[in-house]
C-alpha cells in the first residue's frame, strides 16, 4: 500500500505528469541559481576556503608538522605555493564556474528531495524505503569522499607536485586553471569512489554479489584499489597513494560486512 506523499498522480494524464516535472525542475533551477548567486557575492569567503590548501598553515600540514615534531626535533619545511593567471578572462570564468559548483553542491539536498518527491508516488512502500536509503547513503558517502579529498588527498598531492623540482633553475608557476581543475577532478573521483558501499549493497539486494565472492577476490580488489589510487593521485609519491588507497580499502572491507548483513537479512526474510 502506498503512503500519501502530497503529490496526487492517480488519474493524471501524460501532460499533467510533465507539468509536475516542469514545476520540480523550475524549483531545482531556482535553488541552484540562488545558491550560486550567493556564492558569487561571497567571493572572498568561498575562495578563502578553496585556496587554503596552498598555504602551509592548512590544518593537515600543521597536523603532520606536529607528528614530525613528536618523532624528531626537526620541523617540516615551510612552503607557500603562488598561483598565476594566464588568461584575460580566466579569473572571471573561474569565479563563475566555482560559484556554479558551490551553488549546485549547497542546493543538492533540496534538489534530491524534489526528485524523490516526484518519483515516490510511483513506488511501493518497500521500494520507497530502498530508494530513500540509496539516495541518503549515496549523498553522505559522496560528501565524505569530497571532504577527504579536500582535507587530505588534494593538499598532499598539491604539496608534492607544487614543490617538486627537477632543478633549482626551474621554478614552478602553477596556474589558477590547473589548481582548480585538479581540485574539482580529484574531488569528483574521490566522491564517486566512496559510492562503493552503496553500490555493493544494491548488488547484494539484487542477489548479484555476496560476501563470499568479495572475500575470494580480496587480493584482486587490493590491486584494483592501488590502480584507482594511482589514477586519483597523479604523483609518484607512495605515501600520498597510500593515503588514498587506505580509506578505499577500508570501504571495501566495510562493503563486505554490509553485503554479509544484507544477505543474512534476506535469508531470514
Image (cartoon, rainbow, N blue to C red):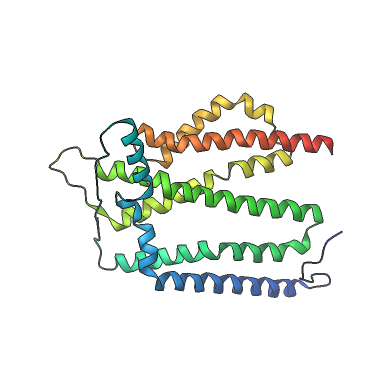
Judged left or right of residue 238, residue 33 is: right
Residue 267 rendering spot, x and y as whole percentages: 81, 34
Residue 188 rendering spot, x and y as whole percentages: 47, 51
Residue at the image point whose x is 57% and y is 48% from the top: 141
Report which quarter residue 132 is drawn in: bottom right
Residue at the image point whose x is 55% and y is 44% from the top: 194
Residue 26 lies, with reference to residue 245, above or below; the image says below
Q: Is residue 201 visible?
A: yes
The mark total stands at 0
Q: Is residue 236 visible?
A: no
Residue 131 rendering spot, x and y as whole percentages: 71, 53
What quarter of the picture does the C terminus occupy?
top right
Judged left or right of residue 15, residue 34 is: left
Report which quarter residue 263 is drawn in: top right
Judged left or right of residue 49, residue 90 is: left
Residue 135 rendering spot, x and y as whole percentages: 65, 54
Viewer-proximal residue among 44 and 264:
44
Residue 166 lies, with reference to residue 180, above or below; the image says above
Taking the view exactly as shown, the residue that stands out farthest to the right is 1
Amino acid at each position: 500500500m502506498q503512503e500519501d506523499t502530497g503529490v496526487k498522480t492517480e488519474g493524471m494524464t501524460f501532460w499533467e505528469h510533465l507539468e509536475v516535472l516542469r514545476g520540480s525542475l523550475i524549483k531545482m533551477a531556482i535553488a541552484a541559481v540562488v545558491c550560486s548567486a550567493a556564492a558569487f557575492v561571497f567571493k572572498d569567503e568561498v575562495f578563502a576556503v578553496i585556496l587554503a590548501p596552498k598555504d602551509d598553515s592548512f590544518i593537515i600540514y600543521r597536523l603532520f608538522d606536529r607528528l614530525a615534531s613528536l618523532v624528531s626535533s626537526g620541523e617540516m619545511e615551510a612552503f607557500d605555493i603562488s598561483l598565476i593567471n594566464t588568461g584575460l578572462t580566466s579569473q572571471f570564468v573561474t569565479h563563475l564556474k566555482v560559484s556554479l559548483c558551490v551553488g549546485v553542491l549547497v542546493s543538492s539536498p533540496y534538489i534530491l528531495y524534489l526528485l524523490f518527491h516526484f518519483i515516490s508516488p510511483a513506488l511501493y512502500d518497500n521500494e520507497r524505503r530502498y530508494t530513500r536509503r540509496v539516495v541518503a547513503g549515496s549523498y553522505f558517502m559522496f560528501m565524505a569522499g569530497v571532504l577527504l579529498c579536500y582535507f587530505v588527498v588534494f593538499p598532499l598531492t598539491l604539496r608534492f607536485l607544487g614543490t617538486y623540482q627537477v632543478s633549482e633553475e626551474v621554478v614552478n608557476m602553477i596556474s589558477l586553471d590547473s589548481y582548480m581543475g585538479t581540485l574539482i577532478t580529484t574531488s569528483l573521483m574521490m566522491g564517486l569512489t566512496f559510492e562503493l558501499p552503496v553500490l555493493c549493497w544494491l548488488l547484494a539486494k539484487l542477489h548479484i554479489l555476496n560476501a563470499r565472492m568479495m572475500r575470494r577476490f580480496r587480493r584482486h580488489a587490493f590491486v584494483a584499489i592501488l590502480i584507482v589510487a594511482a589514477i586519483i593521485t597523479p604523483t609518484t609519491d607512495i605515501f600520498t597513494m597510500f593515503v588514498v588507497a587506505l580509506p578505499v580499502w577500508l570501504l571495501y572491507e566495510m562493503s563486505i560486512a554490509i553485503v554479509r548483513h544484507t544477505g543474512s537479512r534476506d535469508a531470514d526474510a
